[in-house]
């Protein structure tokens, strides 16, 4: 019998086929065997994991690590340390860095920075605003292409004017070109003209309150958002690209997306932890002001979102980890239009989900799907990533589902040093995180080394 490098003994293992109590053997960075009720091999190191649950490591295809350009907020090393503490083993960054990632050369420069600094495996999602760069970006290994249909009113970051695509014809031509690559087009949906008109109305009467800004995009039953998603789905139907819709939160857009999926359109749906744990609660918006983001989901969304997560309409949870310093947020108490948009989340997401799992809102297998296997499948990383099965990379997170903890600002590893959930008591905690069999987080400490992460090129679809 082989000798393993590592044996994780006696955990409840969340596999693609369900939860099984098993010993998991790791050799050469890969999962070498699962042993349930049979003799497991000896190993150089054994982790006793009785009472713990072993999940596939998180695959976060939507992370803002702020490097290059905004490293006072976060950098690749600090961001991936935070990811490791949150149970994530793969991250993919977004193009709103400086310089913006719109060319092959800039993409390759970002990848070089990750190679030096990342603790976990990685990729990056460039912006396809330069039509002539799209093919080259795909060949260089881009995971997804990211479009912002939004530019901020009153601020030029994080939704930078040079990345905003508001013209429907321009968006159409981008989607046509991206279709040829087979790589998903990730879109932040927004009707820019409408939100500008609604914003102008508030500004005209001098109303820059965070309450007003939070209500804006949910106003008129979410039409700002829904109208963009309707166009995207129709465009997908005629152009055939893989559409990955980000930040989904409104009832009408969920209906449109559900219908598109029922027609077998190549549409995948992402929502984010703030939609499920923060922006669904008006009291939290009032209490936290700029630290709760600049949006409210609108009424009657929470149950709809959880139902959509369980029934498979929502495919993926992206952390949308988007740190900003307190100084960049504080202005939001008086002028929310000027405050930086985004909140940190990558360390908090899994504990928040474990807490909901304990309340019966989601099962272990569904959690493993939205947190790991479906993002890996959607972006061409499966089965190397996203599953605890023989032959896959040994990317795993061992969690204690019964450990109570209070999320606190002082325990956050992000450079920004705060969390929207400061003081939130949750049941469930991350114990250890392993990337290709190596501990990157162990018993409350980051032990991974910068440079451990590898660039993950997606497997391109046939013929693309
Ligand atoms: Zn984002």
Image: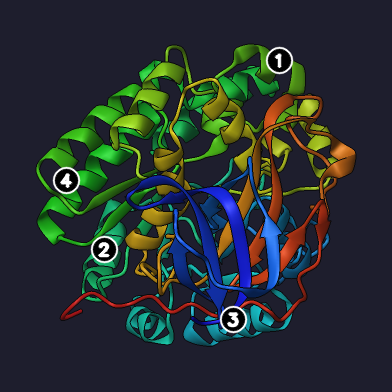
Residue 141 x/y as whole percent: 42, 81
Count neighbours of disc 4 (C-alpha within 10 A) and say few if under 14, some if 14 to 19, many if 20 or more. some
- The foreground one among 214 and 405 is 405
User: As drawn, which residue projects farthest toward the right?
Assistant: 410
Crowding near the residue tagged with mark 3, few <14, some 14–19, many ≥20 C-alpha atoms within 10 Å = many
Q: CA distance from mark 1 to mark 3?
A: 40 Å
The mark lying in front, picked from 2 and 1, is 1
Which residue: 24% across, 37% down? 257
Query: To which residue does mark 4 refer?
Result: 234
Q: Are marks 4 and 2 in contact (CB under 8 Å)?
A: no
Q: Residues within 10 Å of mark 2 (few under 14, many from 20)?
A: many
Secondary element at tag 3: helix
Q: Does residue 81 appear left or right of residue 37 in this picture?
A: right
Q: What's the CA distance linking mark 4 and mark 2?
A: 12 Å
Which label's residue is closer to the chain start, 1 or 3? 3
Dividing the picture into quarters, in which one does residue 376 lie? bottom left
| Camera-side mark, 1 or 3 | 3
- Indicate the secondary structure of the residue bearing disc 1: helix
Residue 394 higher or lower than 359, as above or below: below
- Label 2 vs 1, first from the N-terminus: 2
Q: Which residue is mark 1?
A: 286
Mark carried by residue 111: 3
Image spot of residue 6 (x, y percent)? 63, 71
Pick whichever of labels 4 and 2 is earlier in the sequence. Answer: 2
């Amino acid at each position: 019998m082989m000798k393993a490098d590592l044996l994780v003994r006696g955990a409840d293992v969340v596999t693609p086929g369900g939860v099984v109590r098993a010993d998991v053997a790791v050799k050469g960075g890969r999962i070498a065997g699962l042993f349930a009720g049979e003799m497991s091999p000896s190993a150089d190191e054994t982790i006793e994991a009785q009472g713990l649950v072993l999940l596939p490591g998180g695959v976060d295809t939507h992370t803002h690590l702020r490097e290059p350009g905004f490293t006072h907020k976060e950098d690749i090393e600090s961001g991936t340390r935070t990811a490791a503490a949150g149970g994530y083993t793969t991250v993919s960054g977004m193009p709103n860095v400086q310089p913006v990632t719109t060319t092959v050369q800039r993409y390759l420069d970002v990848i070089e920075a990750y190679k030096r600094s990342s603790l976990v495996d990685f990729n990056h999602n460039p912006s396809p605003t330069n039509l002539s760069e799209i093919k080259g970006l795909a060949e260089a290994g881009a995971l997804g292409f990211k479009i912002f249909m939004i530019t901020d009113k009153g601020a030029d970051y994080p939704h930078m004017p040079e990345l905003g695509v508001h013209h429907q014809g321009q968006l159409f031509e981008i989607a046509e070109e991206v279709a040829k690559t087979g790589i998903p087009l990730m879109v932040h949906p927004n009707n820019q003209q409408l939100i500008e008109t609604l914003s102008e109305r508030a500004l005209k009467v001098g109303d820059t309150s965070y309450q007003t800004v939070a209500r804006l995009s949910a106003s008129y039953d979410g039409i700002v958002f829904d109208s963009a998603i309707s166009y995207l789905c129709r465009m997908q139907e005629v152009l055939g690209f893989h559409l990955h819709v980000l930040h989904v939160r409104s009832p009408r857009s969920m209906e449109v997306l559900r219908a598109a999926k029922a027609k077998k359109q190549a549409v995948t749906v992402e929502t984010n932890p703030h939609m499920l744990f923060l922006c669904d609660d008006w009291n939290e918006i009032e209490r936290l002001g700029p630290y709760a983001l600049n949006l409210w989901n609108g009424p009657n969304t929470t149950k709809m979102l959880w139902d959509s997560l369980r029934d498979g309409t929502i495919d993926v949870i992206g952390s949308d980890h988007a740190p900003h310093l307190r100084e960049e947020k504080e202005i939001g108490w008086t002028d929310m239009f000027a405050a930086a948009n985004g909140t940190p989340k990558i360390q908090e997401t899994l504990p928040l989900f474990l807490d909901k799992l304990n309340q019966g809102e989601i099962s272990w297998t569904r959690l493993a799907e939205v947190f790991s296997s479906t993002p890996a499948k959607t972006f061409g990383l499966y089965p190397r990533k996203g599953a605890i099965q023989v032959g896959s990379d040994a990317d795993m997170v061992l969690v204690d589902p019964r450990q109570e903890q209070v999320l606190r600002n002082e325990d956050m590893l992000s450079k920004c040093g705060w969390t929207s959930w400061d003081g939130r008591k949750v049941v469930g905690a991350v114990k250890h995180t392993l990337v290709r069999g190596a501990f990157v987080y162990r018993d409350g400490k980051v032990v991974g080394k910068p440079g451990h992460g590898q660039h993950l090129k997606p497997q391109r679809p046939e013929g693309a």
